[in-house]
Structures are given as structure tokens and as C-alpha cells.
Amino acid sequence: MKKSRILAVVMSVLMMISMLPVTVFAAEEPATELSGELKIKGAAALDVTLSADYTKVKPEGLTDEDVTFLWERKVSESDKDPLVELSKEKTYKVTAEDIGYKIVLTVTGIEEKGVTGELKVTSKEVTETIPEEELAEEENQEIISEEVQEEIPAEETEEQIPEEEVLEQDQFEEISEEVQEEIPSDSDVNEAVIEEILVNEEVYNADAEEEELTETVEPGTEDTENAEEELMPLGESIPEESLTYSAEVYTADGSGILDFGIAASDAVGDVEYQTVTVKNTGTGTLHFESISPEHFMVQDITEPLESDGEISLWIVPREGIAAGTYQDTITYTSEEGAEVSFQAVLTVQEQEDTASEENVSEADPIEESLIIENISEELNMEEEPDIDGQAEEPVSDPDNSGENTEPDDTGNGDGEETEVSVSVSPDLLDFGTVTEGYETAPEAQTVVITNTGSTEITLVQPVSENDYYVIDALSQATLAPGENAEFTIQPTIGLGANSYSDVLSIVSDKDEALGDVTVSFKVTQAENHLLTITPDSLDFGTVEEGYETAPKAQTVTVTNAGNVKETLGQPVSDRFEISELSSYELEPGASCTFTVQPKLNLTDSFTEEISVPNDAGTSVSFFASIAVAAKKDTPVKLVEIQKPGDISGLDNGTEKTAEAFGLPSTVVIKTSSGEMKAKVAWDVKGCSYDPASTAAQTFSVKGTVSLPEGVTNPDNISLVTAVKVTVNAYEASVVSAEDNQITGITPNGQYTTKSTISFTAVGAGMDNKSPRKGDIRYLPFSWSVINTNTWTSAPYAASFGMGRSGEYTLTVTFNRQKYDGSNWVNTGEQDIRKVAFSVVQAADPTVTPTPGANQRSAVQTGDDTPILPLVVILIAAVICIAGILVYRKKKK
């Protein structure tokens, strides 16, 4: 026996020596790159000191000594904007300047410490005080930590063990057994040592361990599960594999069936809803999927259902389902695979009154959404906790008499039905017909609504969905039985040609349809008398005096381009033969034709305007001209050149061209053979007109006449003519300051502390791209909310955000400028525009603080062997040696 103990001691010493290369002489490991999730320890609030949290960062055991720090302030939501550097210390204390912004922490590995790469994390928006929910979580965390600390027994060290205290034989065997369980399977040397020790000791007594386990459970407690939890290592949670996912559903009567009874097809919507209760009977949280049964509307489970949690859900038949018997199985399924099912039963019978098939239709999605909203609101009211904190149970019928003891809408407890109905008079309004462009709307008409039911009702203000009608406010909204309410309706002014009809719905504040008012109104097109003629001039050329054959006749077409029927008259002329019109009555878009031909024996040249009359008092005309030349043996001489008429009223800045001035291309000359037309060339460049001048100008434009072929000028009459032209002075463009605008921001709008508010200043007259002397405009100059900012050039826009909630005003200043002919010059006057808005604190999701690692890292090496088990074995070996020595001494 003594030899065996000596051998055990020797083997233990050898084991310790064999471990030295693993822990001391291992080669240094290459640098490890940072990875995982970096967090900030501490709430983002004023005067709170922040630090780095490496709980989820790899490599494990990372400390502040292994990295460098950079604390920065994020002043904009845009990632392109630069950050403001705050500190490079290990910690950072939040200041008042940080309020409303976020703090960014960047840690970078120190390669000399065996760490490379960097990690970055952004805090919540900094607030003045720590949010209550975060403060509560921190307090709970401290309480839990204190409780855990109290439960952890102080570990006894070798120094605390009195020299006279020795290990009993069963304690020694227990320690040996624990060492055996912790030895890695791949450690042959260590296993051999322990095996040698165990060979020389008695077998481990399992009853002793069971006794010790029993002693850890408080007297009177036999809950094995609680005992296991107490023995579980501190901080170790239930493994995810051990979570269970299950649920159960309960109906009010415990049958698992919701019986909605029998309902007429037109009264399915009146069937009362019923409820079921779903309970999470597993240990894991359930996340249920949305469902939509065919014949029933159900309430979805939208929030996660925690373990032992339960929720009450409503179920109601869908409106508009056909007659028949329905036994639907309704199943709620969670993403984790848990399912609960129950049956819903309903019998729908055909309604006896089938006078109108239009009433039988599929349920309106809008009505269904209203039903769901009303049921949800009703359930919320029913589930309000009573004084004891429990949801009040709906009043039931204890003796199953079938009578409903819940109060009705009128507050009566006897369940007496109430009737809701109104009469609308008149229910059909016709505002007649007016002509397009009307300036006065037809006279308003009054609609009277009478409460003909047995209960008080509240009406919703009727509206015109298409804005065709103006509706005045109700004379009163709440009507007792027998009371009246009135409102007036009148068509809107300025409607185009069309027929306008609308149906106004009379509804209560409970979305009950009470009646309709049908209104109609027609706008006809205004009469437009418009005739066009093609061509608008006929030139029959030149004939020789005494001609016996007239020039060929030419055709003229008249078209009705208006919107009313036209009746035409026959055109007449002394010098031209005009045929009868092909039609004297023209519908809109129709045309007629006639021919025109010069008469014989005309002796002079002339141009005649010929009119085509109509019964509306308007007419359309065309010009017909012919030149009669003297016989070849008789010379034609110039007698006179008629001076063209003066031209006036031209806009300032008119181009300097004959076309822009409206100068004629020909003038009328008188000859010995009659009047003729002669071409004229105008000397526009030589006139004194200055198109750049803004003043009024009057000047003459000279022109030289070219005589037609065969016309002589034996009397040397001057061929120079002139036209007097007048151009008006420039009227400066003067805009009003009232036209200055601030766009992009909503007046009295509400934003959050995370909103980016953008706006644009639009100055009146800023769209004047070709200014003239005297023009006025308003140039956006500056803007301010808290600080004042100025613009130096377009675009006149800006964006900003507010870090604190409150009421604010955006102010924009515009400079009034006048154009001096070459530049815009400030007049010294300014216009100020303001827009008020408010900012509220943005809501952030709650983040549970994570305790930081309080560990120091060991030197990183290239050896992957786990160190902790080896250290445990080493300690166990030392204890074994001490135990052997003590045992031997005691035995002696």
C-alpha cells in the first residue's frame, strides 16, 4: 500500500512538470483581429461616464489595455457629414453640448498587444436625464447582482484551512471523483495519474453526494427542479435546446366550440362576437402568425406571448356570407410550431324579404375594418383592470335563462332594443342648368334631417367628396328623438361644362348609415359664334382694258368653328359674280362653298372686301382684287403714291425689323389706268429706333417704291414714302412682397428630434431672367431658427435638425432689389416671412444594459490547448498530494 502511495506522489510530480511547456514555453500567437459586437456601457444622458463593453467582442478577455479609443459626436444623420472628436481616453463623460446628438465610440486594436482591426458603436440620442425605463433596468440589475453575491459562498483558500483540519476519507474520495470527471479524454498522462490514485482508494460513495444535495435544499422543500437550479453554476441559463413550445386554447364553456346560433342572411352583422383565451404552456416565447378564416373575422396575436402568458381574442362572423351551415376549424400557429385550434359554428338562413337583390352583397372591406375597430375598442374597455388588478368578467346569465343582463346602448339593464332612424327631406335636389362661365351659383337649398328613432343620435357633418358643392355646417349635431337638424347645399362657382351629380351620406358618429341625399347640377357650354373662311384673299391678276373673257372663277369655303348652329346670308358685290352658297345652315364643324369671278367690262383696278353675313350679327369676309391694264398702245403713268397709315402701340423692346413693326410689303399707287399695288423696300436700319431703350419712342421709317411693269413716271413723282411708328415706354415689373414664400416646411407642423427639416426660400420676381431697368425682385438673404445664417448664392435652401423638443419659428429675410439697367441694387427695404413649427422627443427602443467584462487577457499564443482544465487538474493534483500526506500522518 505504501509503495502505491509513493508511486502516486511521483506521478503527480511528473504531471506538473509535463504541464510546464504548455503554460510557460508556448509560442506566441499571431495578432487576432477584433470581431463581434462592441457596446457602450452607461446611459446616454448628461454627466454619465461612458465606457467600452467587450462582453460580445472577440478575442475573449479583451481589456482597455489592448486597444486605443476615439470618442466622437455625430451631429447629423447623414453618414457623409464629419464627426466631432471628443476624447481619446478610456472613458468619456457626457456634457451638455452632446444633448440631442449621438456618441460614436471607435476602438482600434494595438498590434503589439496581439490585437488588430477596429470596432465602432453608436449610442442612443443623448438626453438630459436617464430615461425611467433604463434607470429601472439598472436598479433591477444591481438588485440581482447583490442577491447573487449573497448566494455565492466564499471560496476557501489554502490559507484559510486550519492546519489541524484534515480531509476525511470520504471527502478525499469525492474530490478524486470530481477530478476524474474533469480530466480531458485526450490527456493520457493525467488520466494515468488519476487512475493510479483511484486504484489505491475506496470506491466513491454515491449516497454521500445525494446526502449533500439534500442538505442544500431548504427543509420542507422537495422540488427537485428548484434544487437543480440552485446547483446550477451562477449565470448559466437554460439551454435553448431545452425550451419547449406549446399552447392551449379555452372557450368560455370549456367545450372548445363557439356556437353563434342561427342568423338571417341580412342580420349576420348583428351577431354578437365571442372570445377565446390562448395560453402559452411552454417555456419559450411564442410568435404567432396572422390568419384570415373564410367565414369568420378573428383577432390576430400581434405581440410575442411569453411563457405562462395568455391573451383573450374575439371572433365574429363575416357579413355577406351566403345561407348555409358553417363549422370552421380556426387554428392559430406560431413560428415555433405550436398550434391551437377551436371550432366556430354558425347557421345562416335566407331572409324572407327578398324585394331587393342589391342588398345581398359581399361584405365591404371598409365596413369589416370598422367592425374590427369597434370590437377591439369594446374588448379594450372590457379588459380594463378592476381595483384588484384583474380584468372584469362580462356579466353573464347565471341561470342560463337566455336573457342578456349586460346594459344596452341606452344604459338600460333590461336589454330593451333601441331604434335608430332618421328622415331626410328632400332627398333629391336638382339645381338646374347654367351656362359655362357663370359668376353666380344657383340659390342654395336646405335639407332637413329629423330623428325618427327612439334614441339620441349624433350626426357627422355631410361632405361632398368631389368638391362640386359647398355644404354649410349642421344647425346642430346631436338630436334627441323628434328633433331636427338643417344644412344648406349650393353648387361651386366656376365649374366647367359637364353634368355634376353627387350622393351625400347621412351617417352617425358610430358610422351608421342613416340616409342619402342625391344632388344634380348641369353646366352647358357657352355659345361661341365663330366662322372661318379659306382663302381670305383672292387675286385675279391683271387683265387688259376691254377684255371679253373674265378670269377663271375661284372657290371660297366657309366653316362653322363655333359650338352653335349658324345661318348664313348670301354675299354680294358690284364688281364680282358670286354663286349661291352650297348650304346656308351650318352645324358646328360643318362647311359650305361658293365661287367668285370678276365681272366683264371693268375699267379700273381695285381690291374689294366681301362679307358673308349670318343671323347672329357676326360676319366673316375675304378680299378680292383685280388689275385692269390699259391697252398696249396706251401708256400707263404714275399719278400718286398713297401714304401708308401710321403704326402705334408697339411694345417696348420690339425687334428692329419690318416684320416686327408691321410695315406693309406693298403700297397702293394711282395710275392713269386706275389703282395698282407696288412693292416697297423699307430702310429699317436707317431709322432712329433703339430697342434697348425703356422710354417711349416715335420715329419714321422710309421706304422706296418699285413701280409695276408697264407703269411709267414721266412727271418724276418721288418714289420715297414713309411710315410714322410709335413704341410705348417700358412698364417696369414690380412684384409684391406678399408673393415671397417658404416652401418645404409645414406651417405649425410637428417634427421629432430625429427629423431633418428642409426648406426653400422663393423670392418674388426671382424668375425674371431678362430684367429691364426699373424691375423689382426680392432676393432671399438670411434665415434663422436659433442662429442666423446667410445665403451668398442660389440655391436658397437649407436643412437643419433640432436636438431638443419645443416650439420654434423659422424666419427668412428677403432684400428688395431694383434693376438699374446693368445690375440688381438693394433698395434698403426688407420683407420678413415666418413659419412656426414644433419638435417633440423621438422615441427610442429600450436597450438592456449589458455588464462589461472585468477580465484581464492572457498572452496570446499559438497553442490551442485549453488552459483552464489543465489548471484545474494541477490544483487537484496538489490537493491529492496534500491529502495523502495528511492521511498517512493521521494513520500513524
Image (cartoon, rainbow, N blue to C red):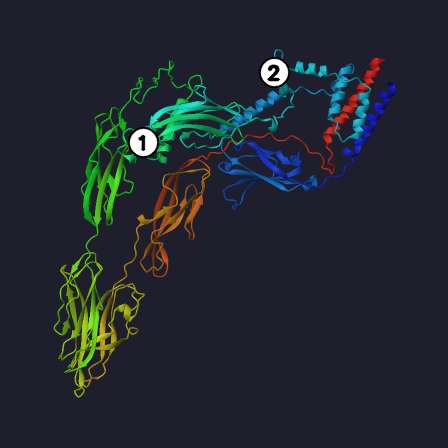
Residue lying at the far right in this picture: please name it: 3
Real-space Cα separation, disc 1 to disc 2, in angstroms: 57 Å
Kind of residue indicated by mark 1: Asp
> Which of 673/259 is in front?
259
* Left or right position of 393 against 426: right
Q: Residues within 10 Å of mark 1 (few under 14, many from 20)?
A: few
The residue where tag 1 is placed is 511
Name the quadrant of the N terminus.
top right
Residue lying at the far bottom in this picture: please name it: 633
Looking at the image, which residue is at 61% across and 13% down? 221
Q: Position of residue 190 (x, y in %)?
A: 79, 28
Say if mark 1 contacts mark 2, CB within 8 Å: no
Q: Position of residue 208 (x, y in %)?
A: 72, 15
Please say if 230 is above or below 440.
Answer: above
> Which of 665/547 is in front?
547
* Left or right position of 417 against 558: right
Q: Please indicate, yes or no, whether residue 359 appears anywhere in the rendered image.
A: yes
Could you tell me which secondary element the residue under label 1 belongs to? Answer: loop
Q: Residues within 10 Å of mark 2 (few under 14, many from 20)?
A: few
